[in-house]
């Protein structure tokens, strides 16, 4: 398996624009997580899904953030409208066993 | 609430052992984990330990768990320059299956 695949790897956008981050989990994994990493706040869990259903979105910072998982092999995290303080590295991770969770390479988002 | 704390920096000489420490708060965590992050990359699972174990060894890595004190450590024997990275301690949250709570990360610098 190629691991968790995220796209794009880098995104630069202007404030106010919509941003969509994409994730393909490892095949067979039934949990999918979106994390955000910043220098100030470290790694924060934004939302996670089990069998495509959102279980806990308490980490989503504002209504500007939304996430979907239309099927077992694809998820999106959308920010609309984007703001400079959303600049961070966004990680997607998937898991099929509590003993291990695998992370993608991340999307580095810069909002100018 | 759930919290994981780590020291932020550690500097060691090549060939020496490195010990990275972590404290956590959730006594009901089933598993505890160590992840490694190299610059510009995602998080790589190094090892995990089940909460009813005291120690786990995997090649150059030794994990020690003191459940009474809620203290976890990672020892890297014969530290190499390639071990330079940020190391994250994480606990599995009792509030959600597979939901990981991360520490701020310890930056390990290995010098000749």
Image: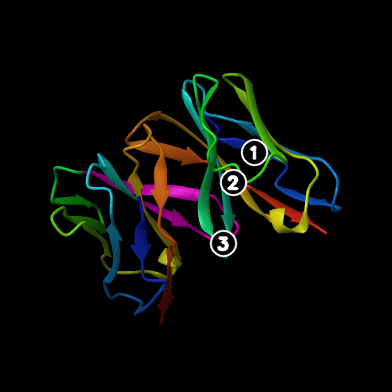
Q: In this view, does B93 lie to the left or right of A86?
A: left
In the image, residue A109 sits, relative to residue A47, either above or below, namely below
Q: Residue at x 36, y 55 (%)?
A: B3
Q: In this view, does A94 lie to the left or right of A105?
A: left
Q: Residue at x 69, y 39 (%)?
A: A63
Residue neighbourhood size for the residue with mark 2, other residues' Cα within 10 Å, grouped as few (<14), some (14–19), many (≥20) = many
Residue A8, x across and y down, in percent: 73, 42
Identify the subunit bearing mark 1. A
Q: In front here: B17 or A41? A: A41
Residue B50, x across and y down, in percent: 21, 41
The residue stretch that appears in magenta = B34-50
Element carrying mark 1: strand
Residue neighbourhood size for the residue with mark 1, other residues' Cα within 10 Å, grouped as few (<14), some (14–19), many (≥20) = many
Q: Are marks 2 and 1 on the same chain?
A: yes
Which residue, given by chain and number where applicable, does mark 2 sit on? A105
Q: Is residue A87 left or right of residue B58?
A: right
- Residue A6 is marked as 1
Overall secondary structure of the magenta stretch? Answer: strand
Judging from the image, the colouring scheme is rainbow
- 3D distance between C-alphas at marks 2 and 1: 7 Å
The C terminus of chain B, quarter of image: bottom left
Residue B94, x across and y down, in percent: 31, 38
Q: Are marks 2 and 1 in contact (CB under 8 Å)?
A: yes
- 3D distance between C-alphas at marks 3 and 2: 11 Å
Q: Which of marks 2 and 1 is nearer the N terminus?
A: 1
Which residue, given by chain and number where applicable, does mark 3 sit on? B39
Identify the subunit bearing mark 3. B
Q: Which residue is drawn at 22% across and 47% down?
A: B27
In the image, residue A1 sits, relative to residue B73, either above or below, namely above
């Amino acid at each position: 398996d190629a691991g968790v695949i995220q796209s794009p790897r880098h995104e630069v956008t202007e404030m106010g624009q919509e941003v969509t981050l994409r994730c393909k989990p490892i095949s067979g994994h039934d949990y999918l997580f979106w994390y955000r990493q910043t220098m100030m706040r470290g790694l924060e869990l934004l939302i996670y899904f089990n069998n495509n259903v959102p279980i806990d979105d308490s980490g989503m910072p504002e209504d500007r953030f939304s996430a979907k998982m239309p099927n077992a092999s694809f998820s999106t995290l959308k920010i609309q409208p984007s703001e400079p303080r959303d600049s961070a590295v966004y990680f997607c991770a998937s898991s099929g066993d509590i003993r291990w969770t695998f992370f993608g390479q991340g999307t580095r988002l810069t909002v100018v | 609430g759930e919290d994981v704390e780590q020291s932020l920096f550690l500097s060691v000489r090549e060939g020496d052992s490195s010990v990275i420490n972590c404290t956590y708060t959730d006594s009901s965590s089933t598993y505890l984990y160590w992840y490694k992050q190299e610059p510009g990359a995602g998080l790589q699972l190094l090892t995990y330990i089940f909460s009813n174990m005291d120690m786990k060894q995997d090649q150059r890595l030794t994990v020690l768990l003191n459940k009474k004190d809620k203290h976890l450590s990672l020892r890297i024997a014969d530290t190499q320059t390639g071990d330079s990275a940020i190391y994250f301690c994480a606990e599995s949250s009792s509030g959600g299956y597979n939901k990981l709570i991360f520490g701020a990360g310890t930056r390990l610098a290995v010098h000749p």
